[in-house]
C-alpha cells in the first residue's frame, strides 16, 4: 500500500485521517507544521501528501509552491482547508496540487481523492498515459468548494484482429482484469464489485487467464 504524509496543525484531524487511512492499509506519517513536513518528505519519500492550507509557520500553498520551484513536488498533493476560497483552490491546483478538499472532509470524498491520486501516481511510474488533470473543475455545494480532477482515461491497448476469436477474447479479458486489479490495488472484493462477478467466479476467471490475484497490490 501507499506511504501517505498528513500535514495539519490540528491534532484531531491528524488522528482522524490517520485512522481512516490506516484502516485502508496505508502507512501514515504525521506532521503538524511546514518544518516537520519538509523533514518528513525527505525522510519518508511519501507517495502522497495531504496538506492543510492554514498552518502557524508556513501556509500550505507557500509550502506547495516551494516544493514546486525546487523540483521537490515528486508526489501528488491533496490540499485541505475549512476556510479557503475558490481563488485559493484554483491557485493551489495551478501550482501543482492534485486536488482540493473542503473541511470537514467526509470519508467518501477523502478515499475517492486518495484513490485518484494514487492511480495517477501508478500511471506515471509505469510510464503509461496518466489520468488527465489539466481540466480540473470547481464544485460549490452548501457553501463548500471541492476541486477534484476528473477520473482519467482507462488503460488502452492495441489488439490484433488476425487471430482466432477465443485468443483475441482471452487477450482482452486479461488486460481488462489486470487494469481493474491495478485500479483496486489487488482488492478482490472491489474488483468483483467493479466487474460484476462473484468472488468465486472471479478467482476462477483469473486462474483461467493465468493471472495472480495479488499482482495489482502496491507495497
Image (cartoon, rainbow, N blue to C red):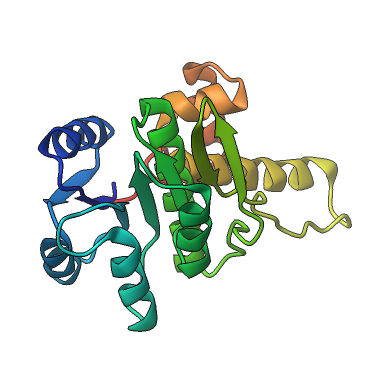
Q: Residue furthest bottom?
A: 70
Q: Nearer the viewer, residue 212 or 126?
A: 126
Relative to 175, does residue 61 appear above or below in the rendering? below
- Residue occupying image coordinates x 38% and y 35%: 110
User: Residue 83, position in %: x, y?
Assistant: 36, 42
| Residue 206 in view here | yes
- Residue occupying image coordinates x 84% and y 53%: 163
User: Residue 76, position in %: x, y?
Assistant: 40, 59
Q: How many marks?
A: 0
State the image quarter where residue 188 is shown. Answer: top left
| Residue 151 in view here | no
User: Residue 30, position in %: x, y?
Assistant: 13, 50
Q: Residue furthest right?
A: 162
User: Residue 67, position in %: x, y?
Assistant: 32, 74
Relative to 108, does residue 114 appear above or below in the rendering? below
In-image side of 183 versus 63 (left or right): right
Relative to 199, does residue 150 appear above or below in the rendering? below
Q: Nearer the viewer, residue 191 or 33?
A: 33
- Residue occupying image coordinates x 14% and y 57%: 33
State the image quarter where residue 115 is shown. Answer: top left
Amino acid at each position: 500500500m501507499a506511504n501517505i504524509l498528513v500535514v495539519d496543525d490540528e491534532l484531531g484531524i491528524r488522528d482522524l485521517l490517520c485512522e481512516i487511512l490506516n484502516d485502508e492499509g496505508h502507512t501514515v506519517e504525521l506532521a503538524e507544521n511546514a518544518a516537520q513536513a519538509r523533514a518528513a518528505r525527505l525522510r519518508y519519500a511519501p507517495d502522497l501528501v495531504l496538506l492543510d492550507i492554514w498552518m502557524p509557520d508556513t501556509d500550505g500553498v507557500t509550502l506547495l509552491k516551494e516544493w514546486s520551484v525546487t523540483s521537490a513536488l515528486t508526489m501528488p498533493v491533496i490540499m485541505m482547508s475549512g476556510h479557503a476560497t475558490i481563488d485559493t483552490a484554483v491557485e493551489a491546483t495551478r501550482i501543482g496540487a492534485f486536488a482540493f478538499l473542503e473541511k470537514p472532509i467526509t470519508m467518501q470524498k477523502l478515499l475517492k481523492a486518495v484513490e485518484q491520486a494514487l492511480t495517477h501516481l501508478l500511471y506515471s511510474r509505469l510510464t503509461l498515459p496518466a489520468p488527465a488533470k489539466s481540466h480540473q473543475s470547481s464544485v460549490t455545494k452548501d457553501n463548500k468548494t471541492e476541486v477534484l480532477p476528473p477520473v482519467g482515461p482507462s488503460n488502452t491497448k492495441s489488439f490484433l484482429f488476425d487471430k482466432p476469436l477465443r485468443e483475441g477474447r482471452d487477450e482482452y479479458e486479461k488486460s481488462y482484469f489486470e487494469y481493474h486489479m491495478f485500479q483496486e490495488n489487488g482488492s478482490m472484493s472491489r474488483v468483483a464489485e467493479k466487474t460484476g462477478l462473484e468472488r468465486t467466479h472471479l478467482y476462477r476467471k483469473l486462474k483461467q487467464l493465468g493471472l495472480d490475484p495479488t499482482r495489482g497490490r502496491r507495497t
